[in-house]
Image: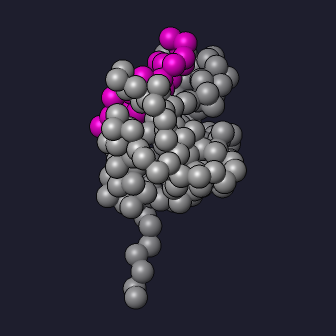
Amino acid sequence: MESCIINTPLGFAKLEGDEHGLSSLTVLNNDIAVSDIIPEILEDGVRQLEEYFNGERTDFSLKLNPQGTDFQKRVWNALLAIPYGKTTSYLQLSKDLGDVKAIRAVANANGKNPLWIIVPCHRVIGSDGSLTGYAGGLNRKQWLLEHESPYKQQSLF
């Protein structure tokens, strides 16, 4: 398993993967040295993340290999279907997966998403539109949603 530390507008993040795909992108809550060398197998992931943060990319075309239960993987696959700039609720996600009663399990799987940003768990909000639960912190979730907002105001200057 290869790994590297990158700097993002939201702080440092650790990217991990191997020949089977990216397995983890996690936000780090402390300052740490950025990797001097990016392993070749992670270069495309780092480049696509830079493009995302620069506003040049709205989706990712990366080979993914997150580790989780079959149910978690179903939820994470459903998250990949949420378009850039859009949100859905935990309730709607449960309905989309065919079991409205699974809302807590869906929320739990969402919270265990190992591929921060790439699998867009930040696009899931409360049914009332509130920002709820985000492993990276609600301030980061807010930032990501604003970054992706199709209604961002353009500067006049």
Classify 119 as above or below 69. Answer: below
Q: In this view, does 66 lie to the left or right of 64?
A: right
Does residue 74 show up magenta in the picture?
Answer: yes
Q: Which residue is drawn at 69% across and 48% down?
A: 29
Point out the image quarter for the C terminus.
bottom left
| Foreground of the two, 108 or 32 | 32
- The answer to whether residue 97 of the structure is visible from this angle is no
Q: Is residue 74 left or right of residue 62?
A: right
Place of residue 71 in the rendered image (x, y in percent of width and height, measured from the top left): 53, 14
Q: In this view, does 141 lie to the left or right of 118?
A: right
Q: Which residue is drawn at 51% across and 55% down?
A: 8
- The answer to whether residue 100 of the structure is visible from this angle is yes
Tell me the quarter of the picture where residue 103 sits. Answer: top right
Residue at the extreme front of the image, as rendered: 36
Classify 95 as above or below 149. Answer: above
Classify 148 as above or below 83. Answer: below
Does residue 137 show up magenta in the picture?
Answer: no
Q: What stretch is highlighted in magenta?
A: 61-82
Classify 23 as above or below 10. Answer: above
Residue at the extreme top of the image, as rendered: 70
Tell me the quarter of the picture where residue 26 sits. Answer: top right
Q: Residue at x 66, y 54 (%)?
A: 31
| Foreground of the two, 129 or 23 | 23
Place of residue 87 in the rendered image (x, y in percent of width and height, measured from the top left): 49, 44
